Structure formats: structure tokens, C-alpha cells
Image: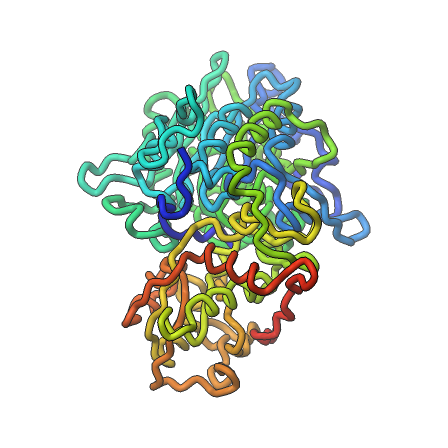
């Protein structure tokens, strides 16, 4: 599921002073960076062209350390058709990978497509993501688009991340060291102030090197207001991605910048989860669907490549532009597990990118593997911030008997989703604490797995506060509200209809709520009405139920407007507090928590 964020983190939380591959089954690494892409013509033969290396990644989400469990792996398709899970990610390895890739490429620019921060593990999130911006500065990021998660703490905090200065409430974290801001521009072309009508930050930037000029336009998804806390974006307007990109492509062309790349925080869904899947099979772009496909088909031919994100998927596709010419559309999964290496051939005479009718610029997704040497400066950065976080991060809060999959599972119901919803119900079910009868949890709010293997010195099976924070980093306050059975059913139907029809968002449900999800049907009909039961009793449309959920979901976030009509709201503890309290109460070294059976949602395929 794409990243789906929540509320502004406040001081109440914590305060401290392939290139597209020729055939499926061929590993992306089999093609070298800058490989021949079959370009022909007078420009190539005359030597007036130069290859520009475009390195890109997306949806890093503050994962400075390698993500735990299945969240920290990528799926690799093998020549025999089998699939292999490869450990990947971590700033030490991402920085090393990018630096290695740049060798031998005098023209190299590094870009990102949003969500570098937000929903971050404790190491970054505890410090309002200053450590991640510092890491991006060090690894040589040149430019990024803004993503929806950059608005998690509001427009003022996003501006501070760009410009620098200590946090207005928490201050500076180290004596004698002031946060300097991002050395790279955040681009917000389609995010404007409602009063001034001007972009919040820069709409575009021009990268220049030895006479080569490439313009970068950055946008986030137009639907950002549907998936972030309304308070954080008050006074801002989010515009259509295509219209905005086309507008600024014309502006750049008038300035003599003919080579243009769009950085778009919106993405697609490839037909396979393997990073080296050939999404141009049987034809260009045939193996990918989702919002980015329509965007790619309508973005002006003046734009030469699309770097995308948001869906956390891996692809390097070729989708024809409106004139019919091939154009690369890429995404590098998430959490720094992959990076994309795209070759752009720049014509010094026309100042444009050469794109033939046969092949678009070559684009390859590479694994950020953990067998390579670590970047020493990143190791030092991580150690410095870990020392500051240690008093909070290392505290044990529970014990588990095995991995409990959350973010890493592709199934509609995840074991960790069950644990979290049960924790929210337990925290709010008492009469004086909300009187909840069931709990619902949005899947995008489950940010990681709980891994059995130790991440530090705490020992196998021990869950630390830092690990729990990585799973639930938003510090959403729990709400308990009145919903009729009819409203609750409508909410369940909105998982697979309306804005969520193309990419369902299946809510995680507490013990006692059961129903059947029939994926052979379409839209709201996928929820089998007669199957919805609470503690074995059929859902009564006329009865009122007390339902616990985080405040983001209660506000209609993630495409659930039915919940906005709830009444009689009670505000409980934060989701993180409910989670850690539950882990402590239901586990010990002698009796660790075991992964639930995930038998609440029956799926028909």
C-alpha cells in the first residue's frame, strides 16, 4: 500500500532539547549503468551528444538504518522463474551505491520523487527528520519533489526542513550545532498558497554542468488532501499534476531549457512485485497500471522522463508520450532499497534529450545490497543520532516468538494489523475510556514489521520502544465514535470503492469483527453484506456501535468519508501508547506474543 500518513506529530509525542529489461527473468544488474540503448543518427555519430546519468530514488521515509524484516527486502525474479528475497536498504549502503554508480560519469545528477521524510523510524522521526535531511545532503541529492508525507507536520515545518533553523518547540538537539536545512531544493510546483496563488516552495530548478542544462519540475499527487491531516495543509491548494507539469515545461522551454524531467510523487502498480520484472511486456507499458499511466500519457512531449513514487513499487517502464514517442517512467520501490540509473542523451546543438522511435533512454533499477562496504560518513551520522536517541529507543516494551509481518505482507489482513487493532480496542473498551466494541486501523499506518532477530544488543525476540515507534510513528490520538451499522458497512465498502476502487485499502480489524471480501466482484459488492458480523452476531444497520480508530481515519482520511459523520467522539491515548501498552501486557520473556492467525477477513479470489 502507498504511504498513508496521519497527523502532525506534536510535542506530546516526545520532546527532547532493466533499464527496462529485454525479457522477464533477466536480473536488472545484468545491464551496466550507461549501457548502449540503441540510439542512432547523426547526432550520436558526430559526437555532439553527451550521456547524462540520472540517478533517482523515492519514498525513503527516514530509513537511515536498514529496514527490519520483510520491509527490508526486495523480490528478485530468477532466470528459472523462481523468486528470491534480497536484503536491501540503509543509508550507509544507498550512499555507497550512488557513489559507486557515479564513477566514470562526468555528467551525473541525483534526484528523488518525494516522501524522503515522514512516517520515519524513531532514529529520524524523534528529531523531526533532521537526520534524514542531513544524510541526503551528504549523499549528494540534487533535487526532489515534495511528497504527501512532507506535510505530516504542516507547511511551516516543511519550510523549516528546506530553509533550516532549530525546531520551534524542541529547539536544537546538540550544543553548538544548528540545523542548516536541505542543500537541495524541494519542488512544489502544484502546491500553491490559496491567497497569493504562488507555489509554496520552488516549482522547478535547472541543473547545469559544463554547458548541459536540464530542468526539473516537482509535483505531488493532487489527492494529497485526502491522505494527510487537514490542519497541516490549511491554506494550501493542490493542483492537477499534468496541467502543472505542462505549464512549467513551457516556462522552461521559453527560458531555453529544452531538456526536462518531471519528478512526480504519484505512481503505478506493476503486474509483478519483482523489481526486475519486465513491465514492457508484451508491449511498452503493458505491464503497469494505476494513476501514473494516465499521467504519463498526457504529460507534454517536452518532458523527457518521469521519475515517480508514492506506491512503493519498483518499475522501469516505457510509456509513449502524447506524440507516440517512448519515454521512461521509473520508480525505485521504497526505503532506499533500490536506486534507478537512467541514461539521458543530451544534444548540445538542440539542447534537448535524444529520444528515438525505437527505444527511450535506458533505465535500470539496481538493488542497494548490503554486501558492499558501508559509507563511513553515514555510519558516523547514524552513530551520532543513535547516541542521542538511545535513552528512549532502547527501552524494552515486549517480547515476540517470531516475526510478526505488517508492512511486508501482501495479504489484505496482516498479523501485525491484527495486533494493532486489538491493542486499540483494549485501550478504549472500558466504559470510562470510550466503551469501544471494535477497532479499525488503516493499513498505510502500519509502517514496518516486528522482527524477531535483534536489531541491537537487546536480544532476539525483544521489542524495543524504537522498534514499536517504527511501526506506529505518527502518534495519532485514538478516537472512539458512534457509528450505525449502516455507516460501518458503508465504511467497509469504501475500502474497495470510490477513491479506493483501483487500489483497495483494506482496514485491519480487531478480534470479533469478521466478514468476507470477494475479489471476484467489483466495487462495493466486494464486501459480502450478510457476512459482516461482530462477535458472531450479524451487523444490525439500525444499531449504534462504538468504534475505535485513529484520528486521521476518523477524519475521513484515506478515502473513508463515512467516518466523518460519526458522533459522540471520545479522545483516548495515542496509537503508539496503546500499542506499547498492549505489547507489555500480553508478552514476557517466558510467554512471548505469537503472530495471530489472520482469520478475521475471508478472502475470495
- Name the one closer to the observer, 88 or 269: 88
The residue located at (66%, 61%) in the rendering is: 592
Query: Which residue is most to the right?
Result: 80
Tell me if I can see residue 455 in this picture.
yes
Residue at the top extreme of this rendering: 210
Relative vertical location of residue 174 with respect to residue 152 in this rendering, above or below: above
Q: Nearer the viewer, residue 209 or 481?
A: 481
Quarter of the rendering containing residue 178: top left
Q: Is residue 63 above or below residue 513?
A: above
Q: Position of residue 374 (x, y in %)?
A: 67, 28
Residue for point 33% across, 63% down: 571
Left or right position of 276 against 514: right
Is 243 located above or below residue 447 in the figure? above
Q: Position of residue 457 (x, y in %)?
A: 67, 41
- Out of 360 and 102, give the one closest to the viewer: 102
Q: Position of residue 344 (x, y in %)?
A: 56, 27
Q: Name above or below for residue 515 compared with residue 255.
A: below
Please give the name of the residue rendered at 42% of the width and 52% of the height, measured from the top-left corner: 475
Q: Which percent across, then down, holds residue 233?
A: 29, 46
Q: Is residue 311 left or right of residue 400?
A: left
Q: Residue at x 45, y 74 (%)?
A: 438
Give the color scheme: rainbow, by chain, secondary structure or one colour: rainbow
- In the image shown, does 451 or 395 lie closer to the viewer? 395
Amino acid at each position: 500500500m502507498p504511504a498513508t500518513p496521519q497527523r502532525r506529530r506534536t510535542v506530546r509525542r516526545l520532546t527532547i532539547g532493466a533499464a527496462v529489461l529485454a525479457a522477464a527473468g533477466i536480473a536488472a544488474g545484468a545491464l551496466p549503468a550507461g549501457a548502449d540503448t540503441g540510439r542512432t543518427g547523426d547526432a550520436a555519430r558526430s559526437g555532439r551528444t553527451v550521456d547524462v546519468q540520472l540517478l533517482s530514488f523515492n519514498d525513503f521515509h527516514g530509513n537511515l538504518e536498514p529496514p527490519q524484516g520483510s520491509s527490508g527486502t526486495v523480490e528478485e525474479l530468477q532466470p528459472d522463474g523462481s523468486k528470491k528475497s534480497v536484503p536491501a536498504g540503509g543509508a550507509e549502503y544507498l550512499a555507497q551505491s550512488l557513489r559507486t554508480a557515479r564513477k566514470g560519469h562526468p555528467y551525473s545528477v541525483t534526484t528523488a520523487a518525494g516522501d524522503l521524510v515522514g512516517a520515519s523510524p524513531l532514529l529520524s522521526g524523534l528529531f523531526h527528520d533532521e537526520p534524514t535531511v542531513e544524510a541526503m545532503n551528504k549523499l549528494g541529492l540534487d533535487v526532489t519533489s515534495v511528497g504527501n508525507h512532507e506535510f505530516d507536520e504542516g507547511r511551516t515545518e516543511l519550510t523549516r526542513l528546506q530553509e533550516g533553523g532549530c525546531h520551534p518547540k524542541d529547539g536544537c538537539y546538540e550544543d553548538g550545532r544548528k540545523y542548516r536545512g536541505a542543500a537541495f531544493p524541494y519542488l512544489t510546483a502544484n502546491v500553491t498558497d490559496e491567497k497569493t496563488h504562488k507555489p509554496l516552495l520552488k516549482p522547478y530548478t535547472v541543473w547545469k554542468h559544463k554547458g548541459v542544462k536540464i530542468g526539473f519540475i516537482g509535483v505531488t499527487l493532487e489527492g494529497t488532501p485526502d491522505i494527510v491531516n487537514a490542519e497541516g495543509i490549511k491554506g494550501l491548494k493542490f493542483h492537477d499534476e499534468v496541467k502543472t507539469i505542462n505549464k512549467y515545461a513551457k516556462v522552461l522551454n521559453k527560458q531555453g531549457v529544452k531538456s526536462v524531467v518531471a519528478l512526480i510523487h504519484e505512481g503505478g502498480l506493476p503486474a509483478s512485485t519483482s523489481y526486475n520484472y519486465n513491465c514492457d511486456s508484451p508491449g511498452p507499458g503493458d505491464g503497469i497500471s494505476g494513476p501514473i499511466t494516465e499521467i504519463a500519457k498526457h504529460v507534454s512531449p517536452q518532458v523527457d522522463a518521469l521519475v515517480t513514487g508514492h506506491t512503493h513499487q519498483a518499475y522501469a517502464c516505457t510509456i509513449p508520450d502524447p506524440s507516440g514517442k517512448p519515454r521512461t517512467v521509473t520508480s525505485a520501490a521504497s526505503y532506499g532499497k533500490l536506486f534507478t540509473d537512467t541514461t539521458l542523451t543530451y544534444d548540445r546543438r538542440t539542447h534537448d534529450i535524444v529520444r528515438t522511435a525505437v527505444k527511450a533512454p535506458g533505465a535500470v533499477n539496481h538493488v542497494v545490497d548490503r554486501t558492499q562496504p558501508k559509507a563511513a560518513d553515514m555510519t558516523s551520522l547514524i552513530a551520532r543520532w543513535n547516541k542521542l536517541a538511545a535513552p528512549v529507543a532502547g527501552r524494552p516494551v515486549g517480547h515476540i516468538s517470531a516475526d510478526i509481518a505488517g508492512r511486508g505482507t501482501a495479504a489484505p489482513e496482516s498479523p501485525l494489523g491484527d495486533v494493532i487493532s486489538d491493542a486499540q480496542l483494549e485501550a478504549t473498551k472500558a466504559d470510562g475510556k470510550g466503551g469501544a466494541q471494535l477497532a479499525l486501523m488503516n493499513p498505510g499506518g502500519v509502517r514496518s514489521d516486528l522482527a524477531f532477530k535483534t536489531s541491537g544488543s537487546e536480544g532476539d525476540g525483544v521489542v524495543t520502544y524504537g522498534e514499536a515507534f517504527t511501526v506506529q510513528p505518527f502518534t495519532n490520538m485514538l478516537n472512539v465514535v458512534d457509528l450505525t451499522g449502516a455507516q460501518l458497512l458503508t465504511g467497509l465498502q469504501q475500502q474497495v470503492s470510490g477513491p479506493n476502487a483501483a487500489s483497495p485499502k483494506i482496514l485491519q480489524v480487531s478480534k470479533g469483527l469478521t466478514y468476507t471480501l470477494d475479489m471476484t466482484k467489483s466495487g462495493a459488492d466486494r464486501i459480502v453484506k450478510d457476512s459482516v458480523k461482530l462477535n458472531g452476531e450479524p451487523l444490525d444497520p439500525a444499531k449504534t456501535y462504538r468504534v475505535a480508530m485513529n484520528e486521521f481515519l476518523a477524519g475521513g482520511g484515506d478515502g473513508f468519508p463515512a467516518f466523518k459523520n460519526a458522533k459522540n467522539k471520545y479522545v483516548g491515548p495515542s496509537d503508539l501508547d496503546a500499542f506499547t501498552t498492549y505489547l507489555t501486557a500480553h508478552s514476557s520473556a517466558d510467554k512471548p506474543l505469537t503472530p495471530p492467525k489472520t482469520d478475521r477477513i475471508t478472502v475470495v479470489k
